[in-house]
Every structure is written in structure tokens, then in C-alpha cells.
Amino acid sequence: MSFLDNSGDIILDAVLTDTGRRQLARGDGSFRIVKFAFGDDEVNYELYATGAAGANRDLDILQSPVFEAFTNNTSTMKSKLLTIANNNLLYLPVKKLNQNLGPQLMLTIGNSHAASSNGAILLSVDKTTSDAFDAGVGNDKLQGLLFGDGTFFSNPRKNEPLTLDQGLDNNATGVQPLGLGSELRESQYIIEVDNRLMNLCSPGNVNNSRAVLSPSFIDDDNIASYFVSFQGGAENLGPDKYFETIETDNDGNKKADTAVNGRPGYRFRFGLKAAQDAETTDYLFTTFGSTITSTTALGASGLSTGLRFIDTTVRITGFTTGYRVDIPVRLLKAF
């Protein structure tokens, strides 16, 4: 990783990613460049000098060093640029994790737990771990913990789907939903997870068991990408579907359980399940993880020793706006 001197001539530095090189090496015609994107990861817009004259205002930005082209697809393009034909937009939508309707970000587990912005979604990976926590909290919903093993993951009470709300995060233009034809409404998402640790599954509800999804693509770093799209029609909207309409109350006000403060788009849901290797072996935890030896604050009365854990991230990217949310996840395994 390095920077390129951008103080003089225009630079065009193009390389193929690891996946692109692999497809090119096949020589079977499968290598085709059909799309491209731009990003501004290295740009510091605070360098814009409002007090300078004319063309010199953005000179420091234009002459700032730029990243060299990376071959690793996970190391670049964190902030993609977006082209919108409508020049009259005053605000752009965001996506926020809804911790009122879905699991919360937690630092500890237990009956007296509290949500924390510095925490993570907690996912138990096998039946032993799930049983221990289930015994510790009884039948109460534990919002900070997802039961991600093969026994419990289909029970929505013990594995709530992750829930994200999309919309404008201010009420300057009211709280009526974004129009169905709006170019800002997200109806397609790309979800990226570590394929060694987790699988994506359908949201489900009490009367609807979950299905484990097949990845759309797995890259050379074992990052699985899942493409989820709204198929249209009211029958594909609802609390047990991937997409749901975010409604206002009878007075047209934002409901208390909505994560955004202004005009909403769709609500998006999906579930998580521990991958087979994470559920059945300790190798990944002993290789990449660490341990928690004190269980007094964990609410897991069935544990006599401790927990192994791995920290990872679930990345959700909107296909329409490119807006991305990274959700920290901590996988737990009793030992």
C-alpha cells in the first residue's frame, strides 16, 4: 500500500483484483469488465479553502496524494461516489441499525444487560453455548444474543433478524415514506460476511422457519457476498420478509420503534447462522479468537469455565445509493 504523487500530471493507475486475475487466467472468455466505480477514500474535503480565490479553492484537494490501485478488493473503495440526475435533492438517505425491533449492540450479556454503541451483536455458535445462555436467562428475550447454532437459529425468539431502517435522518421534509418511484429508495442490498464463520438466512417469524441462503459470490479472502433484492408486490413486504414498509402512526408521526427520524424507505431484515466449521470445531476460535474466563456477568449459568470468541463484521451495502453499514459481531463458543 502506498500513495502516488498527484501534484503534477493526471494519473491513471489500473490493476486487476485477485479475482479478476484468476478469471483472466482461465482463458475461457469469462473475464469481462462490465461495470466500474469511483471512490474518494483518500480525499479530505476539509482542505477546501473557502477564503481562497476562484480556482485555488480546491487546489490542495486536487494535488493531494492518492492511493495506488489495490489488488485486494476488501482494501479499497470504502466510500463510493454516486451520480444522481436530480439536482433538487436537499438530503440523502442513510441506513441505521434498528435496535428497537432487532438485536442490540451489547458489551455484556445478562438479565441486567444494557445496550452500548461500542458493543457488538453476540452470536452463540453451538448447542452447548446456547443451552448455557438459555438456562441463564430463562424464557426472557435476550436482545444482545443470537442463538446461531443449528438447533436454535430457526426460532425467531432466540435469533431475531438484524433489522435496518433506510430513510432521511431528519424531519425537515416530514415523515411520509419515500415515494415508490424515488431514486433514493433501497430495494437491493449486498451483504458480506466471513464465510468461515457465518451464513446468511431468511428473516422468518414465529410461524415461518428460516432458510440458509447460498452466497452469490465468495472471493479469495473467504468473504461471501449475498445479493438480496425486493421482487415487487405487497406479498413480498412484511415482518417475515426481507423488506417491509416503515409506517407512520395514525397522526402521521414517526413511530417510536423507527430508527430514522424523517421520511423512511424500506425496512430490511435478515438472519445469521453460525457456519458449520465454527459450530463443530474449535480450530477457528483457537487460531483467530481469544477467551473470556469470567462468566459472572454473562448470564450463562450453565458455564463452569469460560467462552472463546471471535470478532468479525457484517457489511451491508445499498445497491442504489452505495451507502454502507458495518455491524460488529462477536461469535461465542463455550469451552
Image: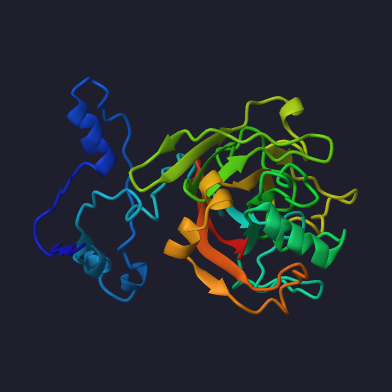
**171 vs 17: above or below:** below
Q: Which color scheme is applied?
A: rainbow
Question: Outermost residue, left direction?
Answer: 9
Horizontally, residue 51 falls left or right of residue 99, namely left
Taking the spot 45% from the left edge, 39% from the top edge, the residue there is 85
> Residue 184 in the image: x percent, y percent?
56, 42
Measured as percent of width and height from the top left, residue 58 is found at 27, 66
The answer to whether residue 39 is left or right of residue 314 is left
Query: Front-most of 25 and 187?
Result: 25
Identify whether 171 is placed above or below 21: below
In this view of the protein, can residue 261 be seen by the observer? no
Residue at the (55%, 38%) spot, across then down: 183
- Which residue extends farthest right? 250
Image quarter for residue 258? bottom right
Query: Where's the N terminus, which quadrant?
Result: bottom left
Task: Look at the image and tell me whether residue 227 can be seen.
Answer: yes
The residue shown at (66%, 34%) is 211
Residue 35 vs 191, above or below: the answer is: above
Q: How many marks?
A: 0
The picture quadrant where one finds residue 228 is: top right
Q: Quadrant of residue 116?
A: bottom right
Relative side of 181 to 16, left or right? right
- Residue 50 coordinates in the image, percent (x, y): 34, 72
Q: Nearer the viewer, residue 281 or 326?
A: 281
Percent across and percent down for residue 19 are 28, 39
Q: Nearer the viewer, residue 164 or 198?
A: 198
* Image quarter (top left, top right, bottom left or bottom right) of the C terminus: bottom right
The answer to which of 44 and 210 lies nearer the viewer is 210
